[in-house]
């Protein structure tokens, strides 16, 4: 259970309901997931987070599937089970295959392993990497 519980639509303030309504309209759903219900205890953070996500995940130079897969990779690295579930579902909806998911997790695992090794060994960055040569 969330630290302070969930704020359901029926119990939400007008400010929170406005965010919930926008969220449902944007995502074309009648459902508010638990992340938003928990965050609704801080209406300013709820609104700010939703506005940021809408802006960042909107169409841009990266296609929706790429954005979802990057979000999924970071969520896996940060070990956020909730975000892993959410963005796995969104990536699947955007067209991610099982093979892409498996390869993504392999890349995430390898990156985490080599990152820890480089950090643990305190490897200095090659000058050629810094200059792009």
Image (tube, rainbow, N blue to C red):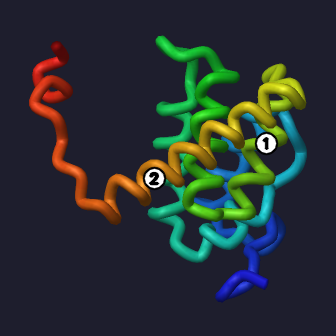
Name which residue lies at 66% across and 33% down.
Answer: 68
Q: Are marks 1 and 2 in contact (CB under 8 Å)?
A: no
- Residue at 49% from the left image edge and 32% from the top image edge: 56
Q: Position of residue 73 (x, y in %)?
A: 61, 43
What residue sits 71% from the left and 42% below the top? 105
> Dot 2, crowdedness within 10 Å: few (<14), some or many (≥20)?
few
Under circle 1, the secondary element is helix
Tell which of 49 and 10 is nearer to you.
49
Q: Quadrant of residue 116?
A: bottom left
Residue 47 is situated, as x and y percent measured from the top left of the image, at: 51, 54
Q: Whole-percent x and y of residue 49?
A: 50, 52
| 69 to 47, vertically: above or below | above
How many marks overall? 2
Look at mark 2 in the image and give the residue it sits on: 48
Asked where in the image residue 64 lies, by quadrant, the reply is top right
Q: Nearer the viewer, mark 1 or mark 2?
A: 1
Q: Residues within 10 Å of mark 1 (few under 14, many from 20)?
A: many
Task: State which quarter of the image contains the N terminus.
Answer: bottom right
Nearer to me, 56 or 48: 56
Q: Position of residue 102 (x, y in %)?
A: 80, 36
Query: Which residue: 80% across, 53% down?
Result: 85
Q: Is residue 65 left or right of residue 43?
A: right
Q: Is residue 54 above or below residue 7?
A: above
Q: Quadrant of residue 22?
A: top right
User: In 3D space, how far apart are the residues under numbered discs 1 and 2 (Cα atoms)?
Assistant: 23 Å
Between 113 and 54, the one lying in front of the other is 113
The C terminus - image quarter:
top left
Examine the rendered structure and indicate whether residue 115 appears above or below residue 42: above
The residue beneath circle 1 is 88
User: Does dot 2 land on a helix, a strand or a loop?
Assistant: helix
């Amino acid at each position: 259970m969330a630290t302070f519980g969930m704020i359901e639509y029926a119990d939400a303030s007008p400010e929170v309901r406005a965010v919930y309504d926008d969220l449902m309209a944007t995502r074309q759903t009648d459902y508010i997931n638990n992340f938003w219900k928990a965050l609704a205890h801080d209406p300013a953070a709820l609104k700010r987070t939703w506005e940021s996500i809408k802006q960042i995940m909107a169409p841009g130079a990266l296609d929706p599937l790429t954005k979802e897969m990057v979000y999924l990779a970071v969520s896996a690295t940060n070990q956020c089970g909730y975000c892993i579930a959410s963005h796995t579902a969104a990536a699947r909806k955007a067209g991610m295959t099982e093979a892409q998911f498996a390869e993504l997790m392999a890349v995430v695992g390898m990156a985490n392993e080599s990152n820890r090794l480089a950090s643990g060994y305190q490897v200095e960055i090659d000058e050629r990497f810094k200059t792009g040569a």
